[in-house]
């Protein structure tokens, strides 16, 4: 099933012209990306334009992209550059002051990697606090890309219990990440949350 494939597998299919795989990437990330861009520019039409350009850019670069885990860093970088371009052209005013713009401009790949590492450390810390089955369900789902049915069989739990455990784990992680971060970091966490 296409929805259970990793970003890396989906990109391989996209390279072969698979539009369903591309749709799957779009469905997986558009809400997070929309939320991030809209918070910065508060303009729905411009946000939609940036998202359209971002995903079009992914399609156009499909033969040269290299994805290890998640497509999100690429999507984030393209969208971020478009927001900066809009600001420079004075077509839209960012919410906040010039500090945010400077942060956006200086957030290069090493910053994103550092943030992803911080994010992973926070996730690991929160996972340790979770009950055993909740932690296992989350790990098998997010890190091993196993289906609900496979997890239920492996852990000898009902499928509904597995779904509940994963939902609760995600809720706890979002809470922890949102409450432990402020300002620009909080915005980036909203973008990077799908790395989980």
Image (cartoon, rainbow, N blue to C red):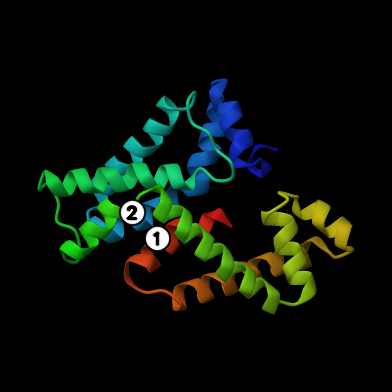
Where residue 188 appears, as percent x and y from the top left, is 40, 60
Left/right of residue 166 with respect to residue 61 in the rendered view: right
Please indicate whether residue 118 sits to the left or right of residue 53 in the image: right
Q: Residue at x 77, y 65 (%)?
A: 136
**Residue 32 appears in view:** no
Residue 73 image offset from top left, x and y in percent: 45, 47
What is the secondary structure assignment of the residue under circle 1? helix
> Which structural element holds mark 2?
loop
Residue 74 locus on image (x, y percent): 43, 42
Q: Is residue 131 left or right of residue 158?
A: left
* Mark 1 closeness class: few <14, some 14–19, many ≥20 residues within 10 Å: some
Decide: marks 2, 1 in contact (CB < 8 A)?
A: yes
> Image height check: is 35 above or below 49?
below
Q: Mark 2 or mark 1: which comes first in sequence?
A: 2
Q: Looking at the image, which residue is at 71% across and 69% down? A: 165
Q: Nearer the viewer, residue 32 or 58?
A: 58
Q: Quadrant of the N terminus?
A: top right
Determine crowd level at label 2: few under 14, some 14-19, many 20+ residues with C-alpha closer than 10 A: some
Is residue 162 or residue 191 the one in the foreground?
191
Residue 7 - label: none
User: Residue 32 at x, y = what percent?
Assistant: 43, 55
Residue name at image x 75 percent, y 50 percent: 147
Residue 86 picture quarter: top left
Residue 186 in view: yes
Residue lying farthest top? Answer: 16
Q: Is residue 86 above or below residue 106?
A: above
User: Pointer 1: what residue?
Assistant: 188
The residue pinned by badge 2 equals 107
State the residue in front, 2 or 96.
96
């Amino acid at each position: 099933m296409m929805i259970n494939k990793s970003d890396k597998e989906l990109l391989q299919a996209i390279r072969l012209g698979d539009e369903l795989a591309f749709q799957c990437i779009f469905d997986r990330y558009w809400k997070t990306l929309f939320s991030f861009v809209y918070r910065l520019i508060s303009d729905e039409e411009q946000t939609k334009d940036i998202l359209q350009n971002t995903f079009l850019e992914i399609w156009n670069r499909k033969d040269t992209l290299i994805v290890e885990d998640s497509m999100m860093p690429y999507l984030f970088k393209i969208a971020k550059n478009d927001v900066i371009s809009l600001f420079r052209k004075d077509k839209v005013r960012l919410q906040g002051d010039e500090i945010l713009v400077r942060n956006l401009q200086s957030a290069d790949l090493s910053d994103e990697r550092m943030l992803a590492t911080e994010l992973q450390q926070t996730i690991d810390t929160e996972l340790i606090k979770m009950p055993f089955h909740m932690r296992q369900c989350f790990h098998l789902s997010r890190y091993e890309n196993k289906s609900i049915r496979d997890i239920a069989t492996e852990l000898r739990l009902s499928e509904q219990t597995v779904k509940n455990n994963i939902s609760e784990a995600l809720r706890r992680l979002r809470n922890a990440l949102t409450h432990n971060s402020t300002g620009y970091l909080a915005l980036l966490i909203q973008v990077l949350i799908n790395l989980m």
